[in-house]
Amino acid sequence: MLDLHRGRPLVMGVLNVTPDSFSDGGRYLDPDDALAHGLAMVAEGADLVDVGGESSRPGADPVDEAEERRRVVPVVAALAPHVRVSIDTVKPSVAEAAVAAGATLINDISGTLHPVAARCGVGWVAMHMQGTPADMQRQPHYGDVVDEVHTFLLERAREAQDLGVTEIWVDPGIGFGKTVEHNLSLLAHAGELARAAAAEGASVLVGVSRKRFLGAFGSLAGQPVGVEDRLEASLALATWAMAQGASMVRAHDVGPTLEAARLVGQEWEVAA
């Protein structure tokens, strides 16, 4: 179980075992390369490593269950003795296989796998997504994005509690079926979600690392900033989310994000 009283938010390192993820597609598809990168994040101080075998970038196609299991299970098994591992999947069979290999948290962008988490006795992250990765960014629309996303997540938290899940995280799904304005609105109200989630016995996870909407910031020339040049924007918004009460952030750049988390944690201690 995670210790949420260690004085700082937690940092979840991203490990994509895929050929087509937006940030590092193909770089860690080989199990040995994936293990080496996972251990490097552990050395940087990652509290968890999140292993995913199916890209959720906008426009991505689904991956066959057997292929996804083939990609992630050996990596989960190799990393589990060294760090807490979460499995990033929407498929029950993949989640179950990963848990059997040593994963103790299911990071679920579909918000549907709480029965699996309850059955397996592990933690669960419920994320909000409008649509699917294949179509989520075509025409995102909401009446009130903050109210709709928060309501969805709190309902899922209650459902998970009713099933007996004891570790529940909620994630507003920045970039998953949202415009830039939607993303910024959700981040602006991150404190409200943190307080509401705490009342339901849940904690907040936020992932903004290297996401597409960040490309609109930081460019003096007016051109979108590329994936590899989004560190500053990623850190700024992750720090904002943590300062608003997010208990964990998901990051590609573990070392710098951990430094930000430590600074936020020190502020929390002084405030207390």
Image (cartoon, grey):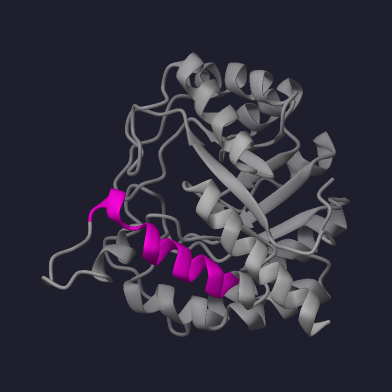
Q: Kindly indicate the quadrant of the structure image that contains residue 118.
A: top right
Task: Report if residue 239 lies within the magenta region.
Answer: yes
Of 144 and 196, which appears nearest the observer? 196
Span colored in magenta? 226-241
- The residue located at (71%, 68%) in the rendering is 265
Placement of the C terminus among the 4 image quadrants: bottom right
Q: How many marks?
A: 0
Left/right placement of residue 144 relative to residue 107 reads: left
x, y percentage for residue 217? 28, 71
Of 60 and 266, which appears nearest the observer? 266
- The residue located at (77%, 46%) in the rendering is 123
Q: Is residue 29 visible?
A: yes
Of 148 and 55, which appears nearest the observer? 55
x, y percentage for residue 108? 60, 47
Magenta span: chief secondary structure: helix
- Looking at the image, residue 16 lies above or below residue 270: above
